[in-house]
């Protein structure tokens, strides 16, 4: 668990770190359509939408529907938020050219993922050498970490290839942070078309990037200083 508060490490600080420009490139050679695993709707978009755009195919394992994004919202119930976020995911996939992707909705409660059950579910979707893109096990958010651990177990069981993408680590960590496995970092450089597709896919989540209403409980989850970290010209995974 990490305290995700304040504005965290700025994108300017990350881009000024020489190491990010020297990480080796990830060869884009999956043996077939990868499985991208999202603890909440939008995690897969923030983390690897550019990569998905470049690959042109992926299946999605949606672990939760993100119904707990705004506890105490004065505008929407948990059920309404879940429905909104499912629609946003579909819109984002269409923007990326992945509207025909298979979406496995696993139905875990937001904030209450059953890690053992999830590991078995993911194992049923994986096969030897298949890419499994998932939130990093050390990301600092409990759902992200539980999902990453479950995916790691499923990959070990099936022989699939584990590729972890950080989300909140860009907030609480800092350049050369010893708690982050920078030695496993791989870059995916994004050409302009992939960056534009990713930007449009992020914009498909208005429930997260804009306030739901005027009350503090309805504030944006992803304000501009957070979104800046996902507008960079590359993405990073830990191999």
Image: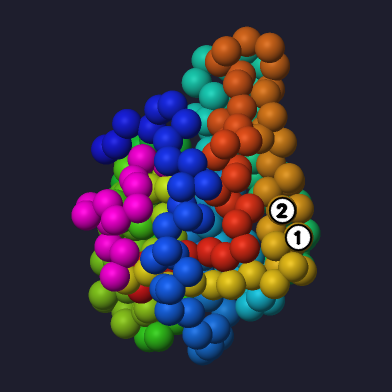
Please provide the residue range marked out in magenta: 171-183
Quarter of the image containing the N terminus?
top left
Q: Which label number is shown at residue 199?
A: 2
Question: Residue at point 29% right, 36% down?
Answer: 2
- Residue 199 shown left or right of residue 102 in the figure: right
Q: Residue at x 53, y 64 (%)?
A: 235
Q: Position of residue 57 (x, y in %)?
A: 65, 75
Above or below — where is 101 with respect to 72? below
Instruction: Give residue 22's quadrant in the image.
Output: bottom left
Q: Residue furthest left?
A: 178
Mark 2, Cα crowd under 10 Å, few <14 / some 14-19 / many 20+, is many
Q: Residue 140 or 6: which is nearer the viewer?
A: 6
In x, y percent, where is residue 53?
Answer: 68, 70
Quick one: 13 or 167, which is closer to the camera?
Answer: 13
Q: Secondary structure at mark 1?
A: helix
* Residue at disc 2, secondary structure: helix
Residue 107: % across, % down? 49, 46
Residue 180 belongs to magenta span: yes
Q: Residue at x 76, y 53 (%)?
A: 200
Q: Is residue 109 above or below residue 157?
A: above
Residue 196 vs residue 166: left or right? Answer: right
Q: Is residue 202 magenta?
A: no
Q: Which residue is mark 1?
A: 196
Is residue 50 something one can see in this rendering?
yes
Residue at 60% of width from left, 57% of height from top? 232
The image shows residue 151, relative to residue 128, as above or below, that is: above
């Amino acid at each position: 668990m990490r305290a995700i508060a304040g504005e965290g490490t700025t994108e300017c600080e990350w881009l000024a770190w020489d190491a990010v420009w020297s990480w080796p490139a990830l060869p884009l050679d999956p043996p077939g359509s990868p499985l991208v695993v999202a603890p909440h709707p939008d995690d897969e978009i923030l983390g690897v939408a550019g990569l998905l755009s470049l690959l042109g195919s992926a299946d999605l394992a949606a672990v939760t529907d993100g119904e707990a994004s705004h506890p105490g919202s004065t505008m929407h119930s948990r059920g309404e938020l879940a429905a909104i976020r499912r629609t946003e995911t579909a819109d984002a996939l269409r923007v990326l050219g992945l509207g025909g992707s298979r979406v496995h909705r696993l139905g875990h409660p937001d904030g209450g993922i059953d890690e053992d059950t999830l590991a078995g579910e993911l194992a049923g979707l994986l096969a030897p050498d298949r890419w499994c893109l998932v939130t990093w096990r050390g990301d600092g958010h409990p759902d992200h970490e539980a999902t990453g651990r479950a995916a790691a177990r499923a990959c070990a069981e099936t022989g699939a290839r584990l590729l972890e993408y950080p989300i909140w680590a860009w907030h609480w960590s800092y350049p050369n942070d010893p708690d982050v496995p920078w030695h496993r970092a791989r870059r995916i450089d994004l050409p302009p078309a992939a960056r534009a597709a990713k930007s449009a896919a992020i914009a498909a989540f208005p429930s997260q990037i804009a306030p739901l209403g005027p009350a503090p409980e309805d504030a944006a989850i992803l304000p501009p200083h957070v979104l800046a970290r996902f507008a960079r010209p590359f993405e990073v995974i830990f191999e």
